[in-house]
Image (cartoon, rainbow, N blue to C red):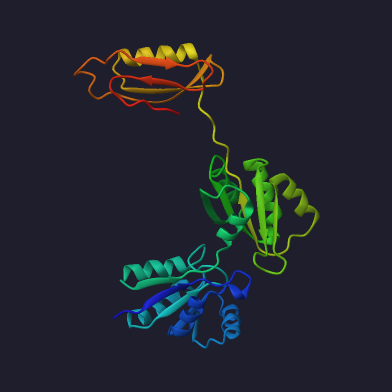
Amino acid sequence: MAGTLYLVGTPIGNLNDLSPRAIETLKSVDFIAAEDTRVTLKLLNHFGIRRPLISYYEHNKVESAAVILPRLLGGESCALVSDAGMPAISDPGEELVRLCGEHGITVSAAPGPSAVITALAMSGLPTQRFTFEGFLSTSNKSRKEHLETLRHEHRTIVLYEAPHKLVETLGDLYDVLGDRDIALGRELTKLHEEIVRTTIGAALEKYRAERPRGEFVLVIRGAPVEKGPRLPLEDALALVEEYRETGMAMLLVMLAPRRDRAETIFTTPRSCAKKKPARKSNFRFSPGKKRAIIRIQKFTTYRL
C-alpha cells in the first residue's frame, strides 16, 4: 500500500506559529523533503524533531522526485516543507503533488501560515476577491508583459517581491497600472514587521530614498469597475416600446437621481415571441425616486 505525502505549512517568520498538528506530522513521517535542508534543520532542532531530510527545490525537483516517488509507492510517508509558508504555493512542490495524483498516492495537508493571506488581511484593501501572481519575472520585458495582463484586473492583486528588485517593480507598476492604492507587507510576523499603506507613487519615492530590507508582499487595489453608458429617459422609454413590440420578454431600466437620465441594465430575448403577442407593457415611475420598474408579459417585477 502506498504511503502519504503531507504538505506541512511552516512559519513565515515567528517559530511559534508552527501548529501542534504540524509538529506531530513532522515527528511521525519517515522522511522530510525540504526546499533548503539547512533552513528546515534549524526549525526541526528548535522543536527537537529528528527525521531524515532530502533536498527538494526548483533546480533538483526532477531528480529528487525520482527518489521520493518510489519511496512513497513503497509505503513510506513524507512531509514536504518549504523555507516558509505553505509548500506547493509559488513553489516546486506543486509538481510533486501532481505526480502523486497521477500515481494514486494520497496527499494530505497540515495547513500553516501564508504570507499571501496574512498581507491581504492586514492591507485594508478589498479581500473578497483577489488574484495571487507570485513573483514577477526578472526580465524587464516579461515583467511588463505580465503587468499588462493585470491592467484591467478588477480584483485585488497580490505579488511577492525581493528587496533588491522592489524599486524597479514599483516603477513598472506605476507605469502600467497608474498610481493606485498599495499596501507593502515586510518582515511579516517577525520582530520588525511593517505594513505600509500608501500609493504606488508614494511607495516608489519612499524606497528610492531608503534601502528596502526584508522580503515584501505587495497588495494592490484592482482597476476600478467602469459603469455602463447612460441613456436619456426618453431614449430608455423608446427602447421599452421597441422591445415590447418586437417580443422582448424583459427589460430593466434604472433611473439616475435625475429624472431625465436612465441606464439600461439587461434584456433577455423572448423565446415564445411567435406563439402569443406580448401583453401591453406597464411602465410605472414615481417622482422623486431613483428607480423605474418595467413589466412586460407575465414576468415578475424586478427592483434594483
- Does the image show residue 42? yes
Q: Position of residue 284 (x, y in %)?
A: 42, 16
Residue reaching furthest to the left: 275
Q: Depth check: 266 or 136 in front?
A: 266
At horizontal 23% and vertical 14% (from top left) the residue drawn is 277
User: Relative to 267, does residue 216 appear above or below in the rendering?
Assistant: below
Q: Position of residue 210 (x, y in %)?
A: 79, 57
Residue reaching furthest to the right: 209
Q: Depth check: 101 or 172 in front?
A: 101
Q: Position of residue 229 (x, y in %)?
A: 51, 23
- Does the image show residue 138? no
Q: Depth check: 168 or 13 in front?
A: 13
Image position of 82 (left or right of 109): right
User: Relative to 25, does residue 121 appear above or below in the rendering?
Assistant: above
User: Relative to 203, does residue 57 appear above or below in the rendering?
Assistant: below
* Quadrant position of the C terminus in the picture: top left
At horizontal 50% and vertical 63% (from top left) the residue drawn is 89
The image quarter containing residue 151 is top right
